[in-house]
Image: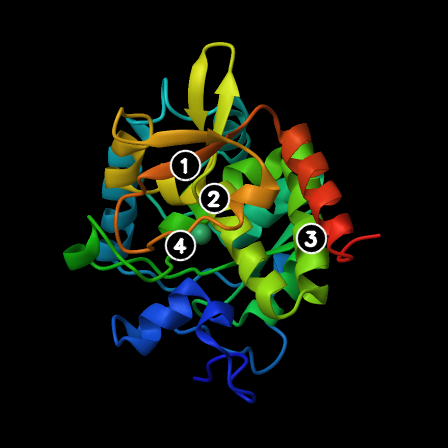
Amino acid sequence: MKVQGKDKKLSSDELSAYEKAAQEGIDPRCIPQKLQGPVPEHDAIEYPDYSESDHENWKYLFDRQVKFLPGRACEEYLNGIEKLNFTRDKIPALKDLSNVFFKTTGWKVARVPGLIDVNDFFGLLRRRVFPSTDYIRGKDELDYTPAPDCFHDMFGHMPLLTDTHFADFYQLFGEAAMRAEGKNRKQLETFHWFTVEFGLIRKPEGMRIYGAGVLSSKGEVQHALSNEVEVRDFNPDTMVLQDYDVWHLQPILFAIDSFEQLKDGFKQWTKKLGLLK
Ligand SMILES: [Fe+2]
């Protein structure tokens, strides 16, 4: 396992929040791994030999989390849940999910072994390929796991990838991030955190959630729309300067008005930085 970017010494404001946490010895599974070669994609992804207990864990998490969605998750995410046709009794096959994306937004899935190096991650996004794990957390981590697993990747991230505007934004994100260095990289990571992982969206029916980190978490999904959270308007210039702590419930979140606004706002902001043309 190799931590990305350690060939040269990075100052603390260039380290990602996960890298800082890993350096503090919190959980080695949160240290990004550099991929050692190509990973299986789309139809080449084999279905793992899951145990009964793996499927039970998926079912438990799925049933628990799906109950929180009405009145909380945004319409685009809920539409994605329908399109993906998740099975509750059985962990879905990445290959099948990849085929839904390919037909809806032209994305595919790649099977990755865990948290991956940011260059590998951005490189896949740039090609409209979503890196997903296929293993699931154990029974002792059903309430919380700091490490990535397929419940977070599939249930949290995948539904929105069936939305055209979000899917286009995410590809642009990969493209811009590949060109970013130093502080720009860190700012892009913060952008990702407050949108892809923890984003809220204003809808005529009220505030709704689209962030994968919220929708796949029992604690965050109940907390994100509560009075304990300060919701700020989406503004890339100020949002990327906001500190956050990956290990606790988020006290500050940012709300977009639409996925077009997310895409256009990201484009304008990265053009200013010279990361997109
Ligand atoms: Fe995530």
SS at circle 4: helix
Circle 3 — which element? loop
Q: Is residue 167 above or below residue 126?
A: above
Q: Earlier in the sequence, mark 1 or mark 4?
A: 4
Distance between mark 2 and mark 1 Cα atoms: 7 Å
Residue labelled with disc 2: 194
- Residue at image position (46%, 31%) is 232
Label 4 to label 3, Cα distance in Å? 19 Å
Q: CA distance from mark 1 to mark 4?
A: 24 Å
Pointer 1 with pointer 4, Cβ within 8 A: no
The residue that label 1 is drawn on is 253
Q: Secondary structure at mark 1?
A: strand
Distance between the Cα atoms at labels 3 and 2?
21 Å
Q: Residue furthest bottom?
A: 7
Q: Is residue 210 left or right of residue 91?
A: right
> Which disc is residue 150 wearing?
4
Label 1: how many Cα within 10 Å (few below 14, some 14–19, many 20+): many
The three-letter amino acid code for the residue at tag 2 is Phe
Q: Dot 4: within a 10 Å radius of its alpha carbon, few (fewer than 14), some, or many (20 or more) residues?
A: many
Q: Residues within 10 Å of mark 3 (few under 14, many from 20)?
A: many
Residue kind at label 4, given as amino acid type: Cys
Residue appearing at x 42%, y 26% in the figure = 73
Q: Which residue in the rendered view is the most extreme toward the top?
A: 205
Given this view, does label 3 or label 2 mark the residue nearer the observer?
A: 2
**Image-based side of 67 in relation to 84, left or right:** left
Residue under pointer 3: 128
Left or right of 51 in this view: 264: right
Cα gap from disc 2 to disc 4, whole angstroms: 21 Å
Asked if the residues shown at circle 2 and circle 1 are in contact, with their CB atoms under 8 angstroms apart, the answer is yes
Q: Residue visible at 55% across and 33% down?
A: 234
Q: Would you place residue 191 above or below residue 126 in this image?
A: above
Coloring scheme used: rainbow
